[in-house]
Image (cartoon, helix red, strand yellow):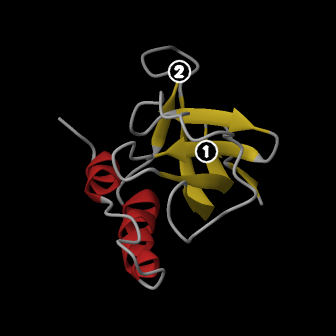
Amino acid sequence: MESRLFQALKAFKGAEGCEANLFKEFKKIAEEAFFSGYFLVNGGCKDAYKLKLTCIEFYYHEDDGNIKDEKKYLKGKDEFGYALGAVCPNPSGVDILFDDPQKKYHASFLIRGYKAIVPGEKDWENN
């Protein structure tokens, strides 16, 4: 069964020629990222814990279109080898990728803030 967040990433349409479309598309992903659950780290292990997202930042870059994001970490037009929803650590945090090789855009959200919920311990939040 796919998570609601994964479904929202899969349904993302990109800008479709208009930058204004991105707000509506990113809003759908943000709602699922914040309200549909948590990330389970070390699931099935005795030291498993949950991460609830508290702050995310979106990135979008078109290789052949008008919307450019010079801060993207991937370099080059042919870097589309990542699976939908891939988790990619980088110098700023952790990106969740949802690129589209056919439409030639790179899209991701950066996890900026989260609350760690560890069983038997006080919740810890980074900001």
The percent position of residue 27, horizontal first and vertical second, equals 42, 74
Q: Of all residues shown, which one is farthest toward the front?
A: 64
Residue 10 is left or right of residue 66, and the answer is left
Amino acid type at circle 1 is Asp
Q: In which quarter of the image is the N terminus?
A: top left
Residue 108 is left or right of residue 27, and the answer is right
Q: Of all residues shown, which one is farthest toward the right?
A: 91
Q: Is 48 or 78 nearer to us in this picture? A: 78
Q: Can residue 118 be seen in this view?
A: yes
Q: Is residue 119 visible?
A: no
First in sequence: mark 2 or mark 1? 2
Q: Mark 2 points at which residue?
A: 42
Amino acid type at circle 2 is Asn
Q: Mark 1 points at which residue?
A: 95
Residue drawn where x is 38% and y is 79% of the image: 24
Residue 82 is left or right of residue 100, and the answer is right
Q: What element carries label 2?
A: loop
Q: Is 120 or 112 nearer to us in this picture? A: 112
- On screen, residue 7 above or below 88: below
Q: Of all residues shown, which one is farthest toward the left?
A: 1
Q: Quadrant of residue 31?
A: bottom left
Q: Quadrant of the C terminus?
A: bottom right
The percent position of residue 22, horizontal first and vertical second, equals 44, 75
Q: Of all residues shown, which one is farthest toward the bottom?
A: 20
Residue drawn where x is 47% and y is 27% of the image: 81
Q: How many labels does the image show?
A: 2
Q: What element carries label 1?
A: strand
How many residues crowd mark 1 within 10 Å: few (<14), some (14–19), many (20+)?
many
The percent position of residue 62, horizontal first and vertical second, equals 53, 59
Q: Mark 2, mark 1: which one is toward the viewer?
A: 1
How many residues crowd mark 2 within 10 Å: few (<14), some (14–19), many (20+)?
few
